[in-house]
Image: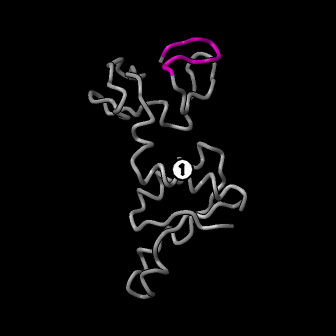
Amino acid sequence: MKRVFSAKDPAVIVIVRDLLAREEIETKVLNEHGASVEGLIPFHLAVPEIWVLRDEDAPAAGAIVARYESGAIRDELPREAWKCPSCGEMNEGQFTQCWRCEEDDPREDRGTRCLKCGYMLWSLPERRCPECGTEF
């Protein structure tokens, strides 16, 4: 196991962990709840850290972390507009929640499935089910 990233902000830990998971890099977060003991132990022991489980994944993970820290990942992900599955409202691609009903973009939810065929819709580049062709 090798440490590839640390950050005090738990939201940043979640973002980086998810970026690594998208590339099928298995990770473990240590000190995830370290803020609860901050002040009782030295600060550097309470900071959340992401560790890769396989040492051979460390270089690829390091490259992903470097792209995240530079802001390049944000620019690499052009997002298409999407239609809310609940209210039918069109939303611009950069938004992950419908402005009208606050429903989440199904591409961001790992549990979202196509209503017609049940195909998993998480992280698809297009707003169409690749299995049956249904738009969402």
Residue 135 at x, y percent in the picture: 50, 14
- Which element is circle 1 on? helix
Seen in the picture, residue 31 relative to 130 is either above or below; the reply is below
Horizontal side of residue 58 vs 86, given as left or right = right
Residue 128 at x, y percent in the picture: 53, 16
The furthest residue to the left: 100
Q: Is residue 121 magenta?
A: no
Query: Which residue is drawn at the image coordinates 55% and 20% (left, top)?
Result: 115
Query: Which residue is under mark 1?
Result: 64
Seen in the picture, residue 71 relative to 52 is either above or below; the reply is above
Q: Is residue 133 magenta?
A: yes
In the rendered image, the quadrant that contains the N terminus is bottom right
- Number of marks in the rendered image: 1
Residue 130 at x, y percent in the picture: 61, 18
Seen in the picture, residue 101 relative to 134 is either above or below; the reply is below
Crowd around label 1: few <14 · some 14–19 · many ≥20 (10 Å): some
Horizontal side of residue 94 vs 108, given as left or right = left
Query: Which residue is drawn at the image coordinates 35% and 32% (left, top)?
Result: 94
Which is the main secondary structure of the residues drawn in magenta?
A: loop
Residue segment shown in magenta: 126-135
Horizontal side of residue 4 vs 14, given as left or right = right
> Looking at numbered disc 1 in the image, what kind of residue is underneath it?
Ile
Seen in the picture, residue 78 relative to 8 is either above or below; the reply is above
The furthest residue to the top: 133
Of the pair 102 and 55, the residue shown nearer to us: 55
Of the pair 20 and 69, the residue shown nearer to us: 69
Which of the 4 quarters of the picture holds residue 91?
Answer: top left
